[in-house]
């Protein structure tokens, strides 16, 4: 690994506006290839699942969700330390669309960002899809669903806490995996990568949690049926008013 690449890598991991979008040249060929294999498998499985499970009427919702996440990622929010972060949206996409369609939406967003805005490299697109699509969306969704069932599936309190925790954890874990990829590639010493990535993304995850809760909260109020796992309103009323006849 040349000194210039090491310098570039240290500069990149030391600042957060690029979040988890790895640029070209920072991953070794074996690590990049391995993540590409997983990413291609994810895309193929997601396309097959969406075709089998989703109806044509849900296609506009996929487009709206992709446009919202893409636009939201363009807005940076300040974090302590004089820098900023932006929404990743994996858990949000999973809560709205489910893990398969949510992952597919995130893949489209990453491709557009890399191809048109150079936000993440094309040769390492597989790693970005792996980190933010598989870890961020799948991991975020299943943690959100498990916590929601534990804390109260039909209550806003349980749902909001589940969304917040899952969104934060998904960002931190994705940052952890990204740091490990950099360390395995020999781009940056593993310890430096872990400290730099986690220190920023622990804070960025808080912003991710707040934005995700606000977005899901709005949908919960106006169109809860649009959630992938909508609340059962009758069940909610019976819990809140146990004296009502069944």
Image: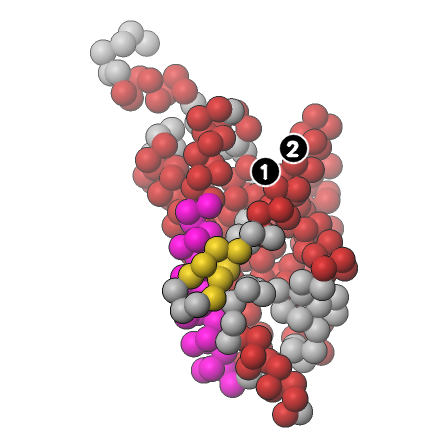
Q: Quadrant of residue 38?
A: bottom right
* Above/below status of 104 relative to 31: above
Q: Position of residue 22 (x, y in %)?
A: 63, 69
Q: Main secondary structure of the magenta part?
A: helix
Q: Report the side of 245 relative to 89 (left or right).
A: left
Q: Report the side of 33 relative to 65 (left or right).
A: right
Question: How far, Cα to Cα, is label 2 from label 1?
Answer: 8 Å
Q: Report the side of 32 relative to 147 (left or right).
A: right
Judging depth in this view, the residue of 96 and 54 nearest the camera is: 96
Q: Give the farthest residue toward the bottom.
A: 3
Judging depth in this view, the residue of 5 and 242 nearest the camera is: 5
Residue at the disc numbered 2: 61
Q: Residue at x 46, y 52 (%)?
A: 208
* Above/below status of 123 relative to 102: below
Judging depth in this view, the residue of 145 and 110 nearest the camera is: 110
- Can residue 71 be seen at all in this image of the molecule? yes
Q: Position of residue 111 (x, y in %)?
A: 73, 56
Tell me which segment is drawn in magenta. 189-211
Check the image and tell me how it is coloured. Answer: secondary structure
Q: Which mark is residue 97?
A: 1
Q: Residue at x 54, y 33 (%)?
A: 228
Say which of marks 2 and 1 sits in front. 2
Q: Give the farthest residue toward the top.
A: 245
Q: What SS does tag 1 mark?
A: helix
**Residue 205 is covered by the magenta coloring:** yes
Q: Position of residue 223 (x, y in %)?
A: 51, 24
Q: Residue at x 53, y 52 (%)?
A: 87
Q: Residue at x 60, y 86 (%)?
A: 7
């Amino acid at each position: 690994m040349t000194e210039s690449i090491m310098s570039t890598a240290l500069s990149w991991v030391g600042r957060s506006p690029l979040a988890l979008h790895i640029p070209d040249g920072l991953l070794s060929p074996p690590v990049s290839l391995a993540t590409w294999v997983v990413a291609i498998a994810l895309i193929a499985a997601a396309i097959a699942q969406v075709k089998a499970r989703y109806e044509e009427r849900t296609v506009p919702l996929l487009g709206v969700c992709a446009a919202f996440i893409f636009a939201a990622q363009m807005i940076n929010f300040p974090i302590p330390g004089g820098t900023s972060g932006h929404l990743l949206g994996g858990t949000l996409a999973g809560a709205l669309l489910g893990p398969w369609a949510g992952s597919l939406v995130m893949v489209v967003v990453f491709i557009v960002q890399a191809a048109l805005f150079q936000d993440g490299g094309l040769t390492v697109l597989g790693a970005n899809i792996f980190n933010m699509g598989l870890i961020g969306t799948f991991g975020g969704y299943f943690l959100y669903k498990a916590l929601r069932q534990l804390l109260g599936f039909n209550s806003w309190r349980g749902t909001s806490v589940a969304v917040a925790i899952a969104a934060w954890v998904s960002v931190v874990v994705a940052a952890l995996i990204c740091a490990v990829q950099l360390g395995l590639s020999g781009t940056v010493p593993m310890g430096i990568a872990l400290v730099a990535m986690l220190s920023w993304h622990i804070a960025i995850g808080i912003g991710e949690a707040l934005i995700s809760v606000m977005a899901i909260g709005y949908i919960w109020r106006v169109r809860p049926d649009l959630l992938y796992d909508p609340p059962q309103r009758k069940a909610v009323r019976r819990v809140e008013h146990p004296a009502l006849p069944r």
